[in-house]
Each structure stands twice: as structure tokens, then as C-alpha cells.
Image (spheres, helix red, strand yellow):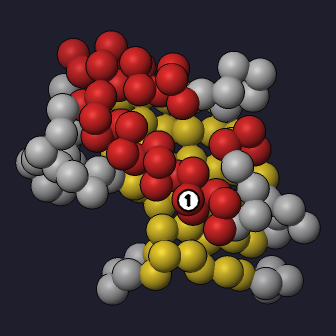
Amino acid sequence: MPDTIRRLAEEQRLCGATVANGFVFLAGQVADDASLDAEGQTADILAQIDVLLAEAGTDKRALLQVNIVLTDIDDAPAMNRAWDRWLDPAHKPARMTIQGKLVDPQWKVEITGIALAPR
């Protein structure tokens, strides 16, 4: 059993992040405003990730891996514009971007990741 498990931003079926054994595991984050385009949804999600990481006691510089799902791979340039504005170029995580169907048809982007947490 891990030392301690912290669950952040708990909802009915999941939590926004789990902190355990020196890591932060982000749940799939989607935009609060699904009416935004892919660039706007990405910026919305990245702001949510900033909040979750801060609550865990860390920030985006500690991200190790990020997985991005786009409902339309043609939205990759728009998503990358928001990503590039947000990214700390000195602390790039490993990243994967794929196309996939999301639960809500209005969502264009979903992002998850793993970061180091302070011990």
C-alpha cells in the first residue's frame, strides 16, 4: 500500500488527479466550455492542469508524460498553438497525440498526464 494517496477535485465517478508515491496522475481533462474551438479548448484544459498541479504542490515543469486525444487530427495545429503558448520550453514532457472519439461530441480535446510530485 502506498504511503498516502491524495485525490484532488473529486467528482461522482472520478477525481481530477491522484497523488501517490511521488507522482501526480492526471485524469483526462476536458474543456469546461465545450463551445470553444480546439485551440480554445486546449487553453482551457491546460489552465485546469495548472490548477491541479498547483494543488498537488507542483507545476507543469514537473510533467513527465502527456497524452492528448483530438476528435479530429486536423485540429493538431490549433491545439499546438495553445500548447506552444503554455509550454515551458526548458521542461518539455514526453507527449503523444492521437485521434479518438470522446464521450461528449462537443469535446474536441482531452489531455491526461503524469508529473512528479514533491515528497
Residue 107 appears left or right of 57: left
26 over 56 or under it: above or below? above
19 over 84 or under it: above or below? below
Q: Position of residue 49 (x, y in %)?
A: 52, 52
The residue drawn where x is 64% and y is 50% is 114
Q: Position of residue 86 (x, y in %)?
A: 54, 30
Q: Give the class, few, some or many, for how many residues have Cα within 10 Å of label 1's Cα (few <14, many ≥20).
A: some
77 over 29 or under it: above or below? above
Q: What amino acid is at disc 1?
A: Val
As rendered, which of 51 and 118 lies closer to the eye? Answer: 51
Q: Position of residue 21 (x, y in %)?
A: 81, 69
Q: Position of residue 43 (x, y in %)?
A: 39, 37
| Residue at far right of view | 119
The residue drawn where x is 76% and y is 64% is 57
Residue 2 appears left or right of 38: right
Q: Which residue is mark 1?
A: 51
As rendered, which of 1 and 74 lies closer to the eye? Answer: 74
**Secondary structure state at the residue bearing disc 1:** helix
Quarter of the figure with residue 64: top right
The residue drawn where x is 39% and y is 54% is 29
Quarter of the figure with residue 75: top left
